[in-house]
Image (cartoon, grey):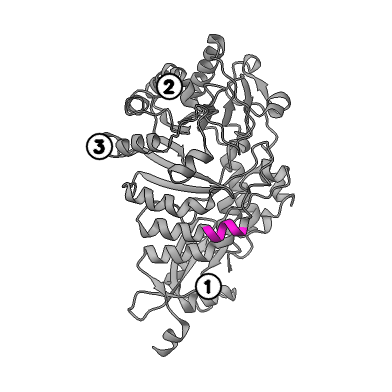
Amino acid sequence: MEKVSRYLVVSDRTYGDGSGVGVRLLYGTRTAKVVAVTADIAGALLAGSLAGVPSPWLDVLRDARIVVPADEDETAAVLDRNRRASADRSAVQISLLPTSYCNMGCAYCGQEHRRGALTSTHRDQVRDRVLRAIGAPSTERVRIDWFGAEPMMGYAVIRDLAPRFVRAAQERGVAYSSVLVTNGSLLTPRKVDTLIRTCGLTHFEITVDGPPEVHDAHRPLKSGRGSFWSIVRTVRAAVDEEDFRSVHFTFRTNVDVHNQDGIPRYIELMAGLGFAKPNVSFSIVPVHSWGNDVSGIEVAKQRFADQETAWLRLLHRHGMSVPLVPRVPKKVVCPATTTAAEIISSTGNIFSCSEYPLVPEAERDLPLVHISRAGLGTARPKGPFDDWNDDIGRGRTWCSSCVFMPTCGGACPKAWQEGHPPCPSYKFNIQDRLDLVAAQCGLGPVPEQALADR
């Protein structure tokens, strides 16, 4: 006996390509797969019936976990899957803060930045801890993130440590990836080349908050100079390098009430500058609390989702890469939910949550351990959110009843703890996103009357 999955979204609209056959889109959130089916099959699934579904289609729907065993507790199955992934020690992720200082003064930032180099003792302790993690028998993949404050203020530390990590991974046959989360203002062509060829960088996440005058006001350099054009020119040169085609560049835009109106102009400008490239993507996200109060500037969720639809359409029109719906289930929500991941602050404190380092109260009250007392083991100490999947199962959030739980995973345990439900924007504009998925496939909405007339 089988049933229709509770984790199914069906498009409100019917689509066609002019051939006379109308289809509706199914989005199975357990597998994050999109399937196009006839309107009749979609209607049967919405009614909870499999009687009218042809046998060949049942195999497709089973593969997408849209049709599941009748006696399966789907919520328990998803949470068990997530628990196994969170317990997996084969994929290690370590985020490092090579400095406590940032050269920008963004109003929405909740960190406290201080000048000063890391001590040689701290650097040695970080190096040894990461090398032990790479060398652990269970490690098959390692990801090293360079995080901030502004990590490029600690470029010398990256240049010193990263090549050692790359070499150790190569010697052990461990797959290596590395992400630099940066404001981009200190990048130069020579440094980008070194970061990729010598330091093993595979992904750059660069924050740009709008067109030049908006970005420069929203993310001001402490020197008083602007940074937009320096960032954009450097990245534009890098994406044209033949040797860097496998390196991915993501432009992240943090949106609040001050820059939301500039996003369309920003998209048009970036398209005109030639960023419609396979290895470039765009992430436009709402500003959120980072240990600070952003209630006066944050955009309401539905308002953000409504505007986001227009931004997604504009990006799509220009052939620029942006995820429309998640295409991979969220088995591990974030580093805070697995002991295979940790963040080492420039203070030496080890955290499980990336939003704690350099936030004064968190640095004082919430470190799991200081690196000098961490011992010679490779797993981080237990953190406050390691039992996150159990919390969902106990109903401490509304995630267990949400159709998007398998692709979202609860999004951010810290936000839930602080009373700010972090539901993703696609929860509020999924139909518009499915329209864009259909458009990518060459399909457009078909009026119901047009289908009836055929």
What residue appears at the point 55 percent right and 36 percent down from the top-left corner?
88
Image spot of residue 231 (x, y percent): 40, 35
First in sequence, mark 2 or 1: give its number.
1
Badge 1: residue crowd in 10 Å (few <14, some 14–19, many ≥20): few
Per the rendering, the mark at residue 12 is: 1
Relative vertical location of residue 173 with respect to residue 276 in this rendering, above or below? above
Residue linked to disc 2 = 162
Per the rendering, the mark at residue 242 is: 3
Q: Is residue 177 magenta?
A: no
Image spot of residue 390 (x, y percent): 70, 45
Q: Is residue 304 magenta?
A: yes
Quadrant of the image occupied by residue 230:
top left
Residue farthest bottom in this picture? 453
Badge 2: residue crowd in 10 Å (few <14, some 14–19, many ≥20): many
Q: Which of 435 and 376 lies nearest the eye of the viewer?
A: 435
Q: Nearer the viewer, mark 3 or mark 2?
A: 3
Relative vertical location of residue 15 with respect to residue 325 in this rendering, above or below? below
User: Which stretch appears magenta?
Assistant: 302-307
Per the rendering, the mark at residue 91 is: none
